[in-house]
Image (cartoon, rainbow, N blue to C red):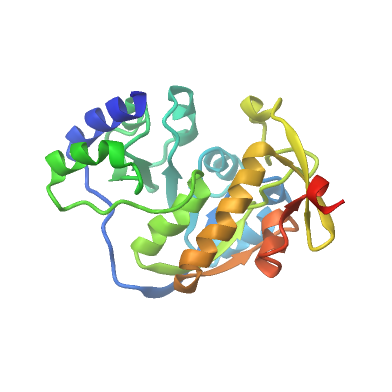
């Protein structure tokens, strides 16, 4: 009900929507908040200075900004109000791609900034709201339950098919994020195995990893992903059929 109320408010703001564009050859980087973002950040910063656009998601936006990298764009999906902190620090040259299900306070904070609204595919319970507002002129973004999985498809819709992704680990490597994010501190931990290599994951990490496998089976032919760092996802890319809970292997 809360998501539906958010959508109802946000689509009345007369913001430009994300719409399909022709495929282009440009490579873009996604900065995701996994722990290996810290160890690979110098390479990401170098590529940004060399002209590669960098897209941040959620808390990676602040991490990039505080470490000397101004993202070209930022993506947000989560509908909870306390996540409105993710869009700060605000920067005029950044393009903000905010889901219609996000809390209205996110859009309020971004007033007078470059904002595009996008909609989640699969939200059939709210499709009537989109049809009432836009008729048939809206383009829902497919993907999984996390902002990273949606961001890949969002920018694919915008014409980008080549991605270098930093910090997309979906596992714990010392910590669950490259930065502090207290709401994830007490999550259940699961041991998983990919091609005989063990990883520690939260339940959310494991679910995202499974969704990633299913997503690439269905749509992977439409984009190229280079995953930086030594996290779970970089190993799944090479061994997509081997993801198991450790208890299922033993």
Please identify the quadrant where the N terminus is shown.
top left
192 or 107, nearer to the observer: 192
Does 115 appear above or below 197?
Answer: above
Q: Residue at x 67, y 38 (%)?
A: 203
Q: Residue at x 51, y 59 (%)?
A: 215
Does 28 appear above or below 200?
Answer: below
> Image quadrant of residue 161?
bottom left
Residue 54 visible from this viewpoint: yes
Q: Residue at x 68, y 64 (%)?
A: 241
In percent of width and height, residue 216 lies at 53, 64
Q: What number of labels is visible?
A: 0
Does 49 appear above or below 140?
Answer: below
Q: Residue at x 47, y 33 (%)?
A: 88
In the image as oriented, which residue stretches furthest toward the right? 250
In percent of width and height, residue 166 lies at 62, 56
User: Horizontal placement of 245 versus 27: left or right?
Assistant: right
User: Horizontal placement of 219 versus 8: left or right?
Assistant: right
Residue 71 visible from this viewpoint: no
In the image as oriented, which residue stretches furthest toward the bottom? 25
Does 171 appear above or below 80?
Answer: below
> Image quadrant of residue 104?
top left
In percent of width and height, residue 223 lies at 48, 70
């Amino acid at each position: 009900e809360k998501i539906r109320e958010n959508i109802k408010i946000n689509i009345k703001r007369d913001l430009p929507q994300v719409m399909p564009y022709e495929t282009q050859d440009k490579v873009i980087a996604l900065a995701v908040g996994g722990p290996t973002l810290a160890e690979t950040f110098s390479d990401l910063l170098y590529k940004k200075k060399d002209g590669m656009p960098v897209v941040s998601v959620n808390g990676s936006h602040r991490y990039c900004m505080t470490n000397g990298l101004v993202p070209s764009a930022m993506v947000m999906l989560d509908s909870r109000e306390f996540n409105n902190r993710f869009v700060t620090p605000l920067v005029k040259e950044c393009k903000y791609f905010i889901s219609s299900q996000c809390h209205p306070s996110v859009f309020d904070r971004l007033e007078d900034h470059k904002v595009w609204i996008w909609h989640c595919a699969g939200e059939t319970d709210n499709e009537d709201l989109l049809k009432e507002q836009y008729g048939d002129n809206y383009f829902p973004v497919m993907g999984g339950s996390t902002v990273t999985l949606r961001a890949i498809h969002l920018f694919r819709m915008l014409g980008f098919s080549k991605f270098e992704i930093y910090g997309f680990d979906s596992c714990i490597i010392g910590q669950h994020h490259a930065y502090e994010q207290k709401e994830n501190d007490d999550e259940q931990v699961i041991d998983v195995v990919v091609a005989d290599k063990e990883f520690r994951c939260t339940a959310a990490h494991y679910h995202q990893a499974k969704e990633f496998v299913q997503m690439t089976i269905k749509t992977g032919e439409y984009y190229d992903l280079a995953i930086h760092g030594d996290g779970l996802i970089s190993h799944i890319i090479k061994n997509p059929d081997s993801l198991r809970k450790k208890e299922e292997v033993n």
